[in-house]
Image (tube, helix red, strand yellow):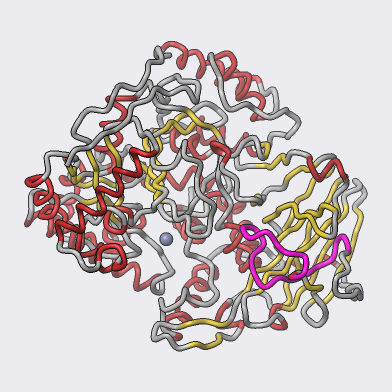
Amino acid sequence: MTIYLVHHSHTDVGYTHPPIAIRQSPSCRAKARLNFWFKADAPPYKRHRRCHQQECRQAQKFLGGGDPMMLTAFYLLGFFHGFAEPVPSPVPRPASPVLIYIAPMSHLDIDFTAPPSQVAEKMRRTIAQAIAFADADPNFVWTVETFWQLERWLETNPPEPQRQRLLQLLRSGRFELGAAYANPHSNAMSAFLLDWLFRLPRQWAGEHQIPMTTAILNDVPGHPIDLPHFLACHGIRYLVIGANLRFSPPLPPQIASTPFWWESPTGERVLTWIADRSYTEAFHELGVDPDSARLFNPQKFGDLDPMQVMERGIAETLRRYRERRYPYDAILALHAFDNWDATAASKLPRFVQMWNERHHAPRLVLATPRAFFEHIERRYRNQLPVYRGGFDGQWESFVRPAIPTAMRRARFAEQVVQTRQPIDLDLIRRLLVFYEHSFGMGPPWANQMSREEAIRHNREQWQLLQTLPMPVSANASEKLGAPEPPPNFADGELRSGALYWLPYHPMLLAPKENDLRPLRPPAWVGWRRETSPDGRERFCYWVDRKKLHADPVCVVWIWALDAKSATAKIRNRKATGWETLPNDRLAGSDWGGWFSPFGFRLGESEFIGDGIWAFRRVQLQGRWWLMGVCLTQQLCAIFKSGEQGTLTFDEAYPGEEAIVALWIDLRQ
Ligand SMILES: [Zn+2]
């Protein structure tokens, strides 16, 4: 097969400095904590920068203040940066043959496919199995996607020779350990937890002399603007995201399946690959391995023999890159599926060899993600584009509004854990599991679990929540006063500050006027408006979740916007500072709304929700409104056997308050 890759030189971004690998240090952690409390009175930072002085000014802007110690630190950062500034040069014509790196792993869903206890057991067996395959086949390679998977195996106290064998495989580079504890809803997490997401694995790797360079964050199709900061704080140079874009708009081509430096607002960089065909790409799209390809994608590969499967998948993939004028000589394809074991990966050495014996180009390279990134960095380090920005919040806006009681409890625990001495690592672990992307209760994904498994799944999640510290007053609504009866208004009437419901989620699907129905008693129990002495208004709403129907339902809050707010940029508070939307979307990646766990500003108004975290602007009846998601809920389910059924509210959402109070504070 002849492969033509068309070369072009990069002109899209300012080029630039090498990555900064900031070693793990107390100052990084302190910085993250400090930044959280800075005020948002600064103009937005810009995406590009040309010199270290400018970088320092931008860091100052993101932090929004003038803390002298912090500024000194950032000026020093820029100083060291400046020393190593490379001379930009065009990307050379890619060498032939093209290299396709295939990286096998198991994607961790702590819930989703089974109750957490069963997933833990499966992951234990998978690690042991991967070691056995490595012993049997010198060409077998494996990546442990997240540290949670390895922890489950370690806690079984495996025999010492087996433990040593694993360490040897990790040290030699045949195995790689991902630098994230789990695949989280990172945009809902505080700076403290984002730090521990990487600190926990990093500490273990350091104690065992394991090289740790790469974080793998699969499935969740977005992460916050400041994520590179937390990676760099722990010396993580590389990041691969197998993004599941099933419910999302396509990613901009500048960042989709192409290497780039992802730069934090404070200037740290991580070499990043976002696989826009997800973590299943190797078999689902490239046909490697052919057995999994035919099983998962029968329409494309079903009637072909193994070599034909790979030839079809690889030819189609190369065409895709050629049409995009991809200028590099190597690509990465992840070979993973949800909570699977290493069986499919054990077939890869044979199929890779089979391909390479029959084809001069491209070459398949069975490897860890790190091997791919080292290749790219070695060849293109100074030519890769640099992008800043976030593309977060999409899945958070779906999952987290289903569990407001649990979210309140976890956020309280996040405050508590930061004050505990000595550090409570078990509590940190439980909080990281809470923010894992498949934590969320409700009915199971269609055909994934039996009814019994679904109930057990939700109970196990609730059991984890039971172990978190509780506020003295367990009922968050106690301090809110008595609810007043909700307003009585007609269908089609839009009233600022009122609740409505939709039969779908309005964050990714723009809501239609006719679909918006007033939420009425008994589901809407009551509301209350209070003004505090500092002029802040609190709008509080009580909803009886047991009175919502069993089909998917999304309760929303709407707020009338004046002409200025309808077009104003959004200043959204992040874990370490503030972002301006839409300017600070990564390469312009925008899904229509924003997730705002820490509050945001729109024009002259500031909004801080508690239970209301996902927002978008919508045009209804000829004017602009702010729409916030209050609750998502569903009780009907399709169980594993295909049987349709309905869970009770307590089965679907154990521990969630049936009558829940949600509120939003508004300062104008
Ligand atoms: Zn997942």
Is residue 38 located in the magenta-colored stretch of the structure? no
Q: Position of residue 274 (x, y in %)?
A: 41, 44
Q: Dominant secondary structure of the magenta stretch?
A: loop
Q: Position of residue 264 (x, y in %)?
A: 53, 32
Judged left or right of residue 22, residue 614 is right
Question: The C terminus appears in which quarter of the rendering?
Answer: top right
Question: Residue placed at 71% from the left, 64% from the top?
Answer: 630
Q: Position of residue 256 (x, y in %)?
A: 43, 42
Q: Is residue 366 above or below residue 309?
A: above
Is residue 513 located in the magenta-colored stretch of the structure? yes
Q: Is residue 224 above or below residue 468?
A: above
Closer to us: 167 or 378: 378
Judged left or right of residue 549, residue 370 is left
Question: Where are the magenta residues, as a range?
Answer: 495-514
Quarter occupied by residue 212: top left
Judged left or right of residue 488, residue 68 is left
Q: Position of residue 313 (x, y in %)?
A: 26, 53
Question: The N terminus appears in which quarter of the rendering?
Answer: top left
Closer to us: 113 or 168: 113
> Where's ligand 1: which quadrant?
bottom left
Q: Is residue 118 above or below residue 153?
A: below
**Residue 651 seen:** yes
Q: Is residue 48 above or below residue 125?
A: above
